[in-house]
Amino acid sequence: MILNKPRVVIAGLRGGSGKTTLSLGLLRLWNNKGRRIIPFKKGPDYIDAAWLSAAAKTQCYNLDSYIIPEQMLLNSLVNHSKDSGGVLIEGNRGLFDGVDAKGTFSTAALAGLCASPVVLIVDCVKTAATVGVIVKGIVEFSKELMIKGVVLNYISNERHEKVIREAVESYAGVPVVGVLKRSDTPFQQERHMGLMSRDETSEIETVLERMAAAVGASVDEEKIWQIAAAAPPLDYAVSEPAASSSDESGAAVRIGVIKDSAFQFYYPENIEALKALGAEIVEISALVTDMPDDLDALYIGGGFPETHALSLSENKHFTGKLKELIECDLPVYAECGGLMYLGRGIVCNERYYSMTGVFPIDFVMHEKPQAHGYTIVEAVEENPYFPKNVILRGHEFHYSKAVNLDMERLNFMFKMKRGKGIVDGRDGLSYKRVFATYTHVHALGCTQWAPGLVRAAAAYKNSR
């Protein structure tokens, strides 16, 4: 199959260099012109992906070749963009930053895999002609990488811009296609090494239109569109999805998904995978609604339960009903924030908030990350969701730490081969048909996940 859609990768030299601002501005500008652009986020990020979805007014998907096999990644890129007018991929961290010194799984590697031209946004604070030397070094370091444009960020004045523009274009031979001026009022507050989540931000449309106006005023977005339109055809072999070895396909089950401002981190591909197996998705809120009693399974994603700890703690009707259903063998799959919600309580700002109490464990919030990065886990015990001895890849990112663990009553299903997990290199708590873990998995890279959840839901439905 040949992918012949306009596409561009927005990359930077580091995290916080302005990639998201530029990407959001371009997406909204193009959307306002009637172009249906599908956004993709490189890496396992949830928050930037949600903002990209809002800016483009269509779903953003993740591209991460560490947790998703390359063939599945290309399938996702093509299938999700086939009816679109083009593709914008926002990179993460620095252009060559991957899991090792070779830049494996980096934004540069992804751009090469997807045969996509790159527009580089460069932080120009307290530097001038050196920017041109840096861009030249990048161009010469990887001649296969298609660096087609540079946007200068945090420019102080016209002289600052003139010097850097001349240096970049004369040293590196790459056109400067835009400039973003230094501003004392950032477009959006940051937290946890990135933007505040979309669900925690008021006046989303106002913020996005401000970004679009700023980008449109000083960035040649039509030139960037021409760069995207000149992307070469991507020829690759289509792989058909593997046939299910069990009877999950077509299972008529109802799976609840807690989706509110406390629990908001879900890969759309995970939800799509459940639907593809016949599941009906029922969105509920742990903050304001009752826990339905007609579900066949429950999926609790990550998020910020600590910022909603009081509301979650006070909703005793929901937590009580959930615990009652769990004792009756309701299958529940929980990730990160969902894991915390199923514990006894959360300590935040020296105050204790009781949670569901399914697991005899508390969680204390810290100012610095307690784990951050990719994970590799091995399922070392029998459980309802994953075959024993299977090796899975995922990621973890949390500021909470498990404390007061009653180890005699805790059953760990995962052994950490990479990452920290819950405690002592272990993760994946299991109780009855509940599975809770710090590790986030992606359905395209963890093909056992969706069938396992649907299978557990069908078994519960048939037993009632």
Image: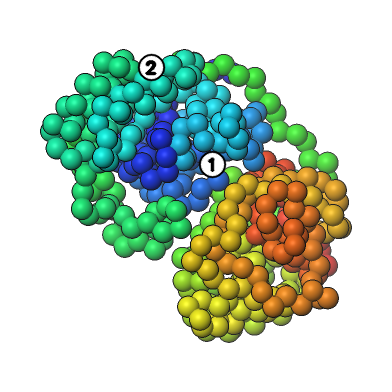
Drawn side of residue 221 relative to residue 82, left or right: left
Residue 28: image location, x then y, percent: 30, 41
Residue 197 in view: yes
Q: Is residue 342 above or below residue 248?
A: below
Q: Position of residue 217 (x, y in %)?
A: 17, 37
Name the amino acid type tagged 1. Gly
| Residue type at numbered disc 2 | Ala
Tag count in the figure?
A: 2
Q: Are marks 2 and 1 in contact (CB under 8 Å)?
A: no
Residue neighbourhood size for the residue with mark 2, other residues' Cα within 10 Å, grouped as few (<14), some (14–19), many (≥20)? some
The part of the image, by quadrant, that contains residue 446 is top right
SS for dot 2: loop
Q: Which mark is residue 442?
A: none
Residue under the image location 70 percent in, 28 percent down: 240
Q: Is residue 286 left or right of 461 when viewed as pictured? A: left
Q: Read off the residue under disc 1.
A: 43
Residue under the point 31% across and 62% down: 202
